[in-house]
Amino acid sequence: EIVLTQSPGTLSLSPGERATLSCRASQSVSSTYLAWYQQKPGQAPRLLIYGASSRATGIPDRFSGSGSGTDFTLTITRLEPADFAVYYCQLYVNSPPTWTFGQGTKVEIK
Amino acid sequence: QVQLVQSGAEVKKPGASVRVSCKTSDYTFTSYSISWVRQAPGQGLEWMGWIHTYNGDTNYAQKLQGRVTMTTDTSTNTAYMELRSLMSDDTAIYYCARGGGLGGSFDSWGQGTLVTVSS
């Protein structure tokens, strides 16, 4: 079973700053199946990035994803107040279809 | 606009069962799979299982094997998740999510259903 480890657990930043979130897989994975979600309190998660680097519909370009192999990154340039939330990475593995989430990174206002 | 609308909150006693529904609209139901994800209070996201809405194939998280069943009703475009032998650790918000495109990601989610297990 592949484990996703996100770091840091909490990121304290000010609006306008850059956020860099890490997701590390316990073994090499296909970037095609790596996604990122944003979750705000009381809301369902929202898809931000799929295929490690493709933005989902309606996601602003200050959100970007990168990485390959075991190391993946979500970058938020110029944090806006609406961006303070918890972010999860997710991996899909086929045969049989199985999904795994990282434990999440909370981006909080400093 | 794609919608997934879940049934309302439930309170159950330990040992009981719960069934949560997820009614979908504005897309072809059998063209996308449905996964169920839960979130215990203050915790992260846990994938519970998946159902192929076209042929009914399922795959469940190992820790829930034997206690969970996922089904669909293609006549009403609704997915169901039943969890049996409930324990206090099953207290969580349960989400349905649409998958099958975009590299296996979940592009639409239900609003969540709170299931509370308490004696």
Image (spheres, helix red, strand yellow):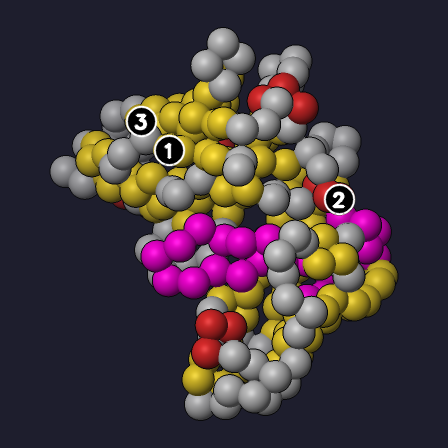
Depth check: give the residue in front, B70 or B24.
B24
- Counting from the top left corner in percent of width and height, residue A74 is at 68, 70
- Counting from the top left corner in percent of width and height, residue B59 is at 61, 27
Residue type beneath disc 3: Val
Our reading of the magenta stretch's main secondary structure is strand
Label 1 near label 3: C-beta < 8 Å? no
Residue B72 in sight here: yes
Q: Is residue A27 magenta?
A: yes
Depth check: give the residue in front, B51 or A4.
B51
Residue at image coords 40%, 33%: B5
Tag 3 subunit: B
Element at badge 2? helix
CA neighbours of label 3 inside 10 A, class few (<14), some (14 to 19), many (20+): some
Q: Which residues are magenta?
A: A23-49
B98 in relation to B30, above or below = below
Residue B18: assigned label: 3
Residue A58: assigned label: none
> Do the residues at discs 1 and 2 belong to one chain?
yes
Residue B103: assigned label: 2
Element at badge 1? strand
Residue at image coords 53%, 37%: B1
Q: CA distance from mark 1 to mark 2?
A: 25 Å
Label 3 near label 2: C-beta < 8 Å? no
Residue B107 image-quadrant placement = top right
